[in-house]
Image (spheres, rainbow, N blue to C red):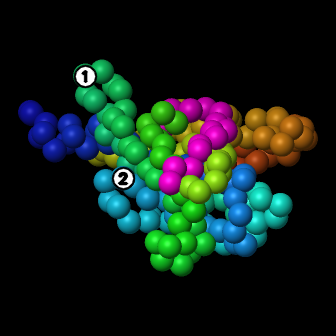
Amino acid sequence: MFKSARWKSEKNKVKVVFKLLFHAAKVGEDALMISVVPADVGKPTVKSDKAAVRDGSCFWENPVYETVKFNRDPKSGKIHERIYYFVVGTGSSKVGVIGEASIDFSNYAEATKVSLVPLPLKNSRTEAVLHVSIQRMQEDVEDNETPKSNYKEHSLMSHLSNGDIDGTIKDNSEVAFTTLTFILTVKMLLLVL
């Protein structure tokens, strides 16, 4: 007859996977890595590979994937703030920290396109800037109901558009085949859930 308060609170939780690409400018070390640190935890949840610095610039080829859990206000539908720090350093103790930048992932929780964000590194001895590419990959609503397949299909369509981030155009038949394959996979997964 009545649903428990626990059920209501679970329905207002959203889990989003973000794909992060990094590029640092105006840095002066040999090799750097990035630690992704949730503000409420204080410890890194993921670290990037080390990347070489060339001419004061550092580009990480491999993306970092971070799963962020959000709480949604039940009345307004607004997603609550989730602050994360990107700590750039050599990987050796606190002495090797070049600087850090912070970001609120709630600003990107419902984004449909890739966001490119320049973040000045705080506590840096130089004017170093960390450029972050943030792309929402998928979203799951944590509740007892089956997730909506419409969202999955919409998310895929925005992810597999004809234009790629580097400006190249994909063949429509390749996109259609990949889209169809992914949609079928998602629907099969939804049936299992």
Which residue carries the number 1 mark? Answer: 75
Answer left or right for 81 relative to 54: left
Task: Give the residue displayed 26% in from the left and 28% down from the top.
Answer: 74
Answer left or right for 37 relative to 60: left
Q: Position of residue 133 (x, y in %)?
A: 66, 45
Q: Position of residue 192 (x, y in %)?
A: 45, 56
Amino acid carrying label 1: it is: Lys
Span of residues in magenta: 109-123
Which dot, 2 or 1, sits closer to the camera? 2
**In the image, is residue 120 part of the stretch drawn in magenta?**
yes
State the separation of the CA atoms marked 2 and 1. 25 Å
Which quadrant of the figure has residue 152?
top right
Which quadrant of the figure has residue 173?
top right
Amino acid carrying label 2: it is: Ala
Determine if residue 119 is in view.
yes
Q: In the orientation shown, which residue stands out farthest toward the front?
A: 125
Which residue carries the number 2 mark? Answer: 39
Q: Position of residue 105 (x, y in %)?
A: 47, 41
**What secondary structure predominates along the stretch shown in magenta?**
loop
**Classed neighbour count for the residue bearing mark 2: other residues with Cα under 10 Å, few (<14), some (14–19), many (≥20):** some
Task: Give the residue displayed 70% in from the left and 59% down from the top.
Answer: 27
Determine whether 95 is above or below 128 in the image: below
- Closer to the chain start, of discs 2 and 1, is 2
**In the image, is residue 132 part of the stretch drawn in magenta?**
no
In the image, 103 versus 108, the foreground residue is 103
Task: Give the residue displayed 56% in from the left and 55% down from the top.
Answer: 124
**Classed neighbour count for the residue bearing mark 1: other residues with Cα under 10 Å, few (<14), some (14–19), many (≥20):** few
For label 2, the SS is loop
Task: Give the residue displayed 71% in from the left and 63% down from the top.
Answer: 28
